[in-house]
Image: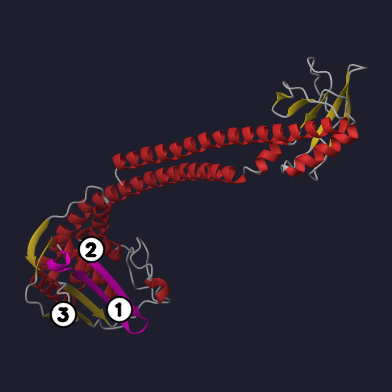
């Protein structure tokens, strides 16, 4: 992912998360206010019912104005205009609180006009929580004569108990933000490590190219020198130097190809070519390299011209054949077919070998970078685990599908399919 794309993704993600949290916070506060207003309205109705009950009990009339006053969010004063019996008051309070589902603890005090003091009544419990310390210092109301004061010490807890869903959604938003920040930091770190790795691989492999070219020129000169050719032992040494140089150069090229595939600027040089001819030449080169017909090729297509990157296609076929040869039992026996699907007309390149096969556990990971199949006691199979990773990425870049199936002890089959034009292929 390029830096610009990563930055855009970061900005969009940040805006989305901040927006969600802002909206969630707004509605959380709004809902809290609504709950508080609803609670206050219910309290006014319940306390009015209590006042009516006391007035009937005392056979007096209630004041027409200023019946209920709210000093703070959880303290109310109720003016009943007559003497109040604390026991009767407590019964009325319990009854009305229960009727209106105000199941929250409360404490009350009754004003004694003779002593000009609030006489504390009781701490009345609906919950199993302990009382919050000594009796509350409830305020007096100077403009009232016969009144009682009630305090709700557990009001916030009561509102929160009816607020669980909103709090849960707010916590989810906070967790989402935390996860986003954590993911961003992890991705940033991984991106830096990947960039360092790519730079290291590119620098290392390019540094190898110059000495490898020099070794190749020198080994070719040695092999062609008359005195070396006359000496069988020296000729063998020169051939070993040349062969190992070719092998090392091949591995360096493979690493460079993978680096190009992973690069953001990878461009496919598309051209139209005859895939049957190119594949046939690759097979001929492989057979010539090993001095025997280890790979057979059969073409049953009528039209084998495709639009693709010929260099990458050639590397793909070489990598598949290289894997089939490396994982063969003894003498490689590989068949390659180019054909059209009888129903869809899709172009299919199929490679079958009779190698050691791959078990189901490893089959899921064969296209992963640097992953190599466990070969047990065999230690003669060399490589970096980049071949099939490169193949998969090139197929994806061209829009081809690749399928690998295998059975232990029987062999492996790889199918690369290019959809026909009528099925949306390139």
- The disc label shown at residue 412, or none: 1
Q: Identify the magenta region.
A: 400-425
Instruction: Tell me the element at label 3.
Output: loop
Which residue is pictured at 28% across the width and 47% down the height? 203
Residue 68 at what x, y percent from top left? 73, 25
**391 falls in the magenta region:** no
CA separation in Å, label 1 and label 2: 18 Å
Q: Is residue 331 left or right of residue 424?
A: right
Per the image, label 1 sits on a secondary structure element best described as strand
At 86% across and 26% down in the image, what residue appears?
110
Mark sitting earlier along the chain (3/1): 3
Report whether 7 appears left or right of 23.
Answer: left
Foreground disc of the pair 3, 2: 3
Residue drawn at the location 30% of the way across and 78% of the way down: 412
- The residue indicated by pointer 2 is 395
Task: Give the CA separation, mark 3 to mark 2.
Answer: 22 Å
Residue that carries the numbered disc 3 in the rendered image: 342
**Residue 342 against residue 80 in the figure, above or below:** below
- First in sequence, mark 3 or 2: give its number: 3
Mark 1 or mark 2: name the one nearer the start of the chain.
2
**Marks 3 and 1: CB-CB under 8 Å?**
no
**Structural crowding at the residue carrying mark 2, measured as other residues with C-alpha within 10 Å and reported as few (<14), some (14–19) or many (≥20):** some
Query: Who is closer to the viewer here, 386 or 423?
Result: 423
Instruction: Indicate left or right for 410 with 123 as reference.
Output: left
């Amino acid at each position: 992912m390029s830096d610009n794309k990563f930055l855009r993704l970061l900005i969009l993600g940040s805006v989305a998360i901040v927006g969600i949290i802002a909206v969630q916070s707004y509605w959380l506060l709004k809902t809290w206010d609504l709950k508080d207003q609803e609670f206050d309205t219910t309290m006014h109705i319940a306390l009015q019912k209590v006042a009516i009950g006391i007035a009937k009990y005392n056979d007096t009339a209630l004041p027409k104005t200023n019946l209920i006053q709210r000093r703070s969010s959880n303290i109310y004063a109720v003016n009943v205009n007559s003497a109040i019996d604390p026991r009767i008051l407590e019964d009325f309070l319990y009854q009305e609180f229960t009727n209106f589902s105000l199941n929250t603890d409360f404490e009350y005090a009754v004003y004694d006009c003779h002593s000009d003091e609030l006489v504390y009544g009781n701490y009345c419990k609906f919950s199993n929580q302990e009382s919050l310390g000594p009796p509350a210092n409830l305020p007096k109301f100077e403009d009232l004569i016969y009144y009682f004061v009630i305090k709700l010490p557990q009001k916030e807890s009561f509102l929160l108990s009816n607020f669980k869903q909103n709090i849960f959604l707010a916590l989810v938003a906070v967790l989402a933000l935390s996860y986003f920040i954590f993911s961003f930091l992890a991705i940033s770190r991984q991106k830096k490590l990947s960039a360092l790795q790519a730079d290291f691989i590119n620098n290392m492999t390019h540094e190898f190219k110059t000495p490898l070219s020099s070794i190749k020129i020198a080994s070719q000169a040695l092999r062609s020198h008359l005195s070396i050719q006359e000496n069988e032992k020296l000729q063998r040494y020169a051939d070993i130097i040349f062969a190992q140089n070719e092998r090392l150069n091949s591995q360096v090229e493979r690493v460079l190809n993978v680096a190009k595939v992973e690069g953001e600027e990878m461009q496919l040089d598309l051209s139209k070519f005859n895939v049957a001819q190119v594949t046939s030449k690759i097979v001929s080169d492989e057979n010539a390299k090993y001095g025997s017909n280890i790979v057979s090729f059969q073409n049953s297509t009528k039209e084998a011209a495709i639009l693709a990157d010929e260099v990458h296609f050639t590397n793909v076929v070489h990598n598949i054949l290289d894997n089939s040869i490396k994982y063969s039992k003894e003498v490689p026996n590989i068949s390659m077919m180019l054909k059209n699907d009888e129903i869809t007309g899709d172009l299919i390149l199929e490679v079958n070998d009779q190698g050691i096969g791959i078990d189901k556990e490893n089959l899921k990971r064969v296209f992963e970078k640097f992953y190599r199949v466990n070969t047990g006691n065999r230690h003669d199979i060399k490589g970096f685990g980049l071949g099939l990773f490169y193949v998969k990425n090139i197929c994806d870049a061209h829009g081809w599908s690749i399928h690998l199936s295998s059975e232990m002890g029987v062999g492996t089959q790889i199918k690369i399919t290019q959809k026909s034009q009528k099925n949306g292929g390139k």
